[in-house]
Amino acid sequence: MKARQLLGTYLGVALAAALLSGIHALGDSRLFDALVAGIVFTAVNQLIYAYPDDIRGAHPIVLLAFGAVGIVQDTLIWLLVSWLSGKMGDGLHVDGFPTALLGGVVVRASTFVLLALGPRPVPQVPQDS
């Protein structure tokens, strides 16, 4: 599940950088700049985990709640990426909040899709000692 989450995050960052005209590369290599942004996304998403354990078995209200919280989280991460990129001179620059919001939707949607496509997680049964 973690591998699909990571792949979805990187795919979402690359898609948002390619599709949204308000996200610009600051360096020479757009691929490297997207990779830098993906690393920031991955680090923050590991600290603040906002994904249901079983996306296909989750109640729709739970999915909406996780989706809304996740979109806000990813929007703030886009703004953080833009700020850090400006300080480093490499990375992706986001023009404003509306572009960051759209980028957050793209990243969260791509991650949810990849989480839903894979096999269901096997429930962990506690072992008696």
Image (spheres, rainbow, N blue to C red):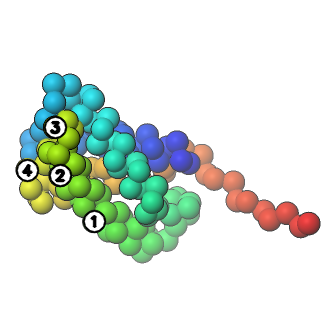
**What's the residue at 27%, 56% (across, down)?**
77
Label pair 2/1, CB-CB below 8 angstroms = no
Q: Residue furthest right?
A: 129
Q: Earlier in the sequence, mark 2 or mark 1?
A: 1
Q: Earlier in the sequence, mark 4 or mark 3?
A: 3
Q: Is residue 54 left or right of residue 66?
A: right
User: Based on the displayed image, in which of its 4 quarters is residue 18 positioned?
Assistant: top left
Residue 47 percent coordinates (x, y):
45, 60
Question: In 3D space, how far apart are the residues under numbered discs 4 and 2 (Cα atoms)?
Answer: 11 Å
Label pair 4/3, CB-CB below 8 angstroms = no
User: Based on the displayed image, in which of its 4 quarters is residue 22 positioned?
Assistant: top left
Question: In 3D space, how far apart are the residues under numbered discs 4 and 3 (Cα atoms)?
Answer: 15 Å
Label pair 3/1, CB-CB below 8 angstroms = no
Q: Nearer the viewer, residue 105 or 73?
A: 73
Which three-letter amino acid code belongs to the residue tagged 4?
Asp
Q: Which residue is mark 2?
A: 83
Q: Which residue is mark 1?
A: 72
Label pair 4/2, CB-CB below 8 angstroms = no
Q: Does residue 50 lie above or below 108 as drawn?
A: below
Q: Is residue 64 visible?
A: no
Q: Which residue is mark 3?
A: 89
**What's the residue at 80%, 65% (across, down)?**
126
Q: Is residue 30 left or right of residue 129?
A: left
Q: Residues within 10 Å of mark 3 (few under 14, many from 20)?
A: some
Q: Which residue is mark 4?
A: 95
Which three-letter amino acid code belongs to the residue tagged 2?
Trp
